[in-house]
Image: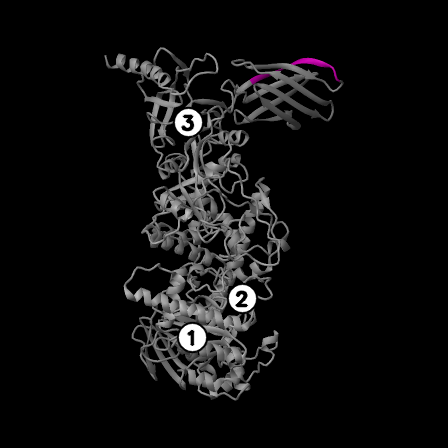
Amino acid sequence: MKIKLLALSFLLGGISLFAQDYFPKNDGVKTKNNNYTAFTNAKIYMTPTQVIEKGTLLIQNGKVVQVGKSVSIPKNAVVQDLDGKSIYPSFVDIFSNFGVKTPERANNAGRSAQYGPEREGFYWNDHIMPENNAVSSFSYDSKKAEELRKAGFGAVNAHIQDGIARGTGLLVALNDEGSEAQRILSDKSGQYFSFEKSVAKRQSYPGSLMGAMALMRQLYYDLDWYSKGNVDTKDRSLEALAANKGLTQIFAAGDNGNVLRADKIGDLFGIQYTILGGGDEYERIDDIKATNAKLILPLNFPDAFDVSNPYQAEYIALKDMRHWNLAPSNPKVLADNGVEFSITLHELKSPSDLKEKLMKAITYGLSKTKALEALTTVPASILGMSGQIGSLQTGSQANFLITSGEIFDENTILYENWVQGTKDIIQSMDLVDIRGNYDLNVNGNTYTVSLTGSIDKPKAELKKGDDKVDSKMDFSDNWLNLSFSDDNMGSYRMIARVVPGSNTISGKMVLPNGNETMANLTKTSPFEEKSEDKSTEKPELVALSYPNVGFGYKEKPKQENILFKNATVWTGEAILENTDVLIKNGKIDKVGKDLRAGGATVVDATGKHLTAGVIDEHSHIAALAINEGGHNSSAEVRMKDVIDPTDMDIYRNLAGGVTTIQLLHGSANPIGGRSAILRLKWGENADGLVFPNAPKFIKFALGENVKQSNWNSFSRFPQTRMGVEQVYTDYFQRAKEYDAKKKSGKPFRYDEEMETLAEILNGERFISCHSYVQSEINMMMKVAEKFNFRMNTFTHILEGYKVADKMAEHGVGGSTFSDWWAYKYEVNDAIPYNAAIMASQGVTVAINSDDAEMSRRLNQEAGKTVKYGDMSEIEAWKMVTLNPAKLLHLDDRVGSIQEGKEADMVLWSDHPLSVYAKAEKTLIEGKVYFDLEKDQMLRESVKKERNQLIGMMLNEKKNGGKTRTPVQNKKERFECETL
């Protein structure tokens, strides 16, 4: 009875659908096809983990009606027997630009950059465009849809890939025969973001990664303020952002560092982004896993480098070689660590490349089930569309693939891709399997023909006796076209139509003289699939290091208790001969003579010098961006957002005894970004490099740079030095008013820029100010005094000797170069006695680098002050240790060797102010982050690994793999693998 009712409901359902059309029929008499289609005896993957053997799939009107082993097939059903074949859900890509017009790049002609927005009624920044809807610029592309269907896709989620806030996407079924209304499954399928500016807009801000991050944060603060009804005018961008907050939020990050940066923004505002990765997540898998984010994963595995030219091979960075070797393992690593991901075609040259990349990932350990989930159920779940796409359940879209077997088998044929019940034939199911061994008799000669490969793309090998004969074969739509050349006989060509079930392929043979005759390929034995046990053929993978570049460590340094015996100890106040220093639990425990080890590792330091670690007050290493020059104030940006823990300069600095740096914003604008004070813990992630509980700093700048008068910034304020003063006065007045309103308890719009400047006024943040000319130095101190705070440090300060008395009275320190001068006009008056003169007036003076190369030789730069100014050795040494620690307000923790301070120390082979001195060991918190002996071992390890990877790449080329030509980049070569 139930079966009869079910069949009746099928029939009535079809009539009901037709009867309920609400639009008139004025274009002739038409009959709507409500027939069912039933696919029987197939192996059906309802989901990657729900598999039905010998099952039936029943569809009608583009939807799945029923699926199972026992399905009642209605009378008005077309039945297709798929015995021996498989059915899978069609694939889904959720990061696509299918059918969406790519914005044209803006014309940047003109004398000046654009600082304000072009639009009115929208957010103040043109790169914020959440009001954009991809459906508004969508045009279905049949040609591209065909390519996607051939790769197995039934639906794609497209968006406008332009801008920081990109607007909403649309989910499209790849059905050529459907109407637009039928194809578009969702016209607002997700909200997209990135760190990339719009190519179609000219607004200068943001001009950096840290600027983009600050803009994103401020956008969300402004959304909160706007949503509470605090703004009288209407902002269409914020209206759209608020309206779309319930959608899936997708962030285009593009590499493992940006995945973490995007996630931090999301965490700050309670948003869990789905994040587009970069294929390098394996390098930082623990951090990636901790985000709890679902990833969209490109399979952009790089081709091997062509290393046949040894000169070119020298300029390939080890990290790039490693990435070639390890990238195919990325999906497996993510899956093994429980990170959920979908797979995208993004960054592949063609959809047809997908299978090759998938097969490679599977070879590297990705399970086939996880691969199928990443193409079906996971993307559907991310979009909240699990009931419609990505699986074959009752009521879902009839999007499915018919294959000859297991979909990720190398020889499996994709026969058909049905989208919304519309069939697309990829390869005819009538295709005959012609593989096997044959004899061919022509002109009294017998040739053996072996047909191997896949069913749809067989390969031919001809032999005459034991000699191989040059041949070429095409096979399409069961037509065989075989040509070959026999040195003795000439060229032949056979054309034959293959008949199913026959062991003989008969056709026409064109002889060398042009005559035609009949010829037969007579099968002598069937094709036997070689059962290669690939389970033991695991790809050879090199080991990761921390960081994953040349000279990275296989294990992160561990804290040790160490006793240095009989060293010459530079405490920071005195030089002690034959003295011992005991380090316990990361701190300096004791300083004295004849100390006992108590289980600590003993280091014989006889004839060597032990000092505090070098501190660089002004550095720009280990950063992915230095300047945010799009505004005259960028107090909202943070250098800690763009820390690059893989920068080889970290290791080089450790090799020069440097343990702490202040990572400063550049000098593109009067008010720069917030500093990051770093401990150079080589191997830690970005957060692990940040000096814990360090005071807050910001970079200001004076002089030629901040006017940007050589940047073609003609519409920007300021353009003069006196204009720079007015910028400071204006911003501090605004910050004062902002802070007063905040403290009043009245509602206020949270402004990251004003928050930062208010911290300065409240003594919670210190200024390190780029400076040269005495008039501006005086001006800056007067502005500070006007707003009742003190400048902390003038850095560069090359005319500091002219105003040293005023600096001492104000209470500001100086961080200068030892002997740089005359490298631009405003430093023409610089002298090498500057440091000594400022120190003589009571100014706390440090020597800084501002240069990635000089930073690892700051011990020598300090030594120059002994020559230029007759400084004592201990006072000279303070200029790169204790004095910068004082300027950074860290002298209670580091900068000298005193009991109770943190064990940031250096063991030198010679007098530390000497050009002959080498840092033998550099310690941070009692951990050895650089060891000269270990460095020699690392050098050998790098050479060995390079040779190993070069050998792998040569084999890849030899075996027919794709290769790419190395690009000569000496900077990259040096940064990754040499000191």
- Residue behind mark 2: 979
Is residue 465 visible in the rendered image? The answer is no
Mark 3 and mark 1: Cα distance apart in space: 64 Å
Residue 681: name its quadrant.
bottom left
Residue 643: name its quadrant.
bottom left
Residue 451 inside the magenta-drawn segment = no
**What's the magenta region?**
514-523
Closer to the camera in the image, 583 or 294: 294
Q: Nearer the viewer, mark 3 or mark 1?
A: 3
Q: Secondary structure at mark 3?
A: loop
Mark 2 and mark 1: Cα distance apart in space: 19 Å
- Residue behind mark 1: 613
- Residue behind mark 3: 399
- Judge whether 580 appears above or below 468 on screen: below
Residue 789: name its quadrant.
bottom left
Residue 520 inside the magenta-drawn segment = yes
